[in-house]
Amino acid sequence: MSIREHFKINNPHHAYLIEGKREEVFPEIVSVVESWGVKISDNPDFCHISTDTFKIEDARNLKSLTSERGITKSKKIFVISANNFLLEAQNAMLKVFEEPAGDVLFFIITPDIAALLKTLVSRFYLIKTNKEDMGNEAEKFIALPVNKRIDFIKKLINETEDNLNSTRSKSLKFLNALETTLHQKKVSRVTLDTFEQIFKAREYLRQPGSSAKNLLESVALML
């Protein structure tokens, strides 16, 4: 289903969080907004922020921009596309969405919703365009001996090593699938330490400069 089906012209949600690829999602957003009769080109109330990593300075700038009055008669529209949102930036963004202005509309595009704080995600209307399911990979991983798990991780990383953000996103999805599978299968040998290691790996993966390979290997050894 096209993301267009989620938008209502008469009563749109104030903020949409869309999981997908920016090069695919952004043109659809533009098409939807233009179908509402809102001009995109040379519109001072339409702002597209595209960045690799959304930092605390970006969040503060966004808060400042949203507090300014619009120039046109239509809503102020912000489209933010980023591969990674730093934790301090997410915390700062919470304040923007706690009491949203009535004349502001947000579209956030990210490759992995699971990488965001749940308290932030709860403030959005969610749209998922990614269809990747790593449940089967997680089950295979659990059944392997330790040395084979390390080989599994190398293969997983090598498939996206040319794109750091794709590697991080895929690793996060894999950890989420692994955690879910371990809970559902109730694997007897799994201890609380294993889930704590998955949690730590996921948190570190969200930080710039982290090594997906090393973090996944730490989980493989702990399991």
Image (cartoon, rainbow, N blue to C red):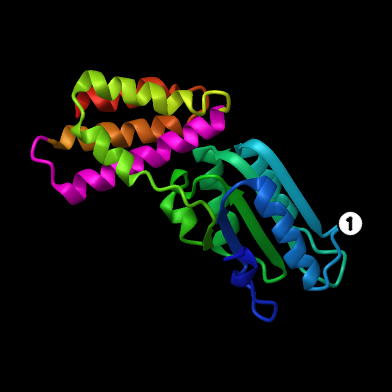
**Residue 124 in sight from this viewpoint:** no
Q: Which residue is mark 1?
A: 41
Q: Quadrant of the C terminus?
A: top left
The amino acid at mark 1 is: Ser
Residue 60 horizontal/vertical position (percent)? 65, 44
Residue at position x 78%, y 71% in the image: 35
**Residue 188 magenta:** yes
Q: Residue furthest left?
A: 188
Instruction: Say left or right for 192 vs 151.
Output: left
**Residue 23 magenta:** no
Residue 139 horizontal/vertical position (percent)? 25, 40
**Residue 113 in sight from this viewpoint:** yes
Residue 50 horizontal/vertical position (percent)? 71, 42
Residue at position x 66%, y 60% in the image: 106
| Front residue of this view, candidates 36 and 99 | 36
| Front residue of this view, candidates 29 and 132 | 132
Q: In this picture, is 59 found above or below 15?
A: above
Residue at position x 83%, y 73% in the image: 37
Q: In which quadrant of the rendered view does residue 148 lie?
A: top left
Instruction: Say left or right for 170 vs 192.
Output: right
Q: What count of labels does the image hold? A: 1
Q: Which residues are magenta?
A: 164-189
- Magenta segment's dominant SS is helix
Residue 147 horizontal/vertical position (percent)? 23, 18
Q: Residues within 10 Å of mark 1 (few under 14, many from 20)?
A: few
Q: In this picture, is 165 found above or below 127?
A: above
Q: In which quadrant of the rendered view does residue 198 lie?
A: top left
Q: In this picture, is 131 found above or below 104?
A: above
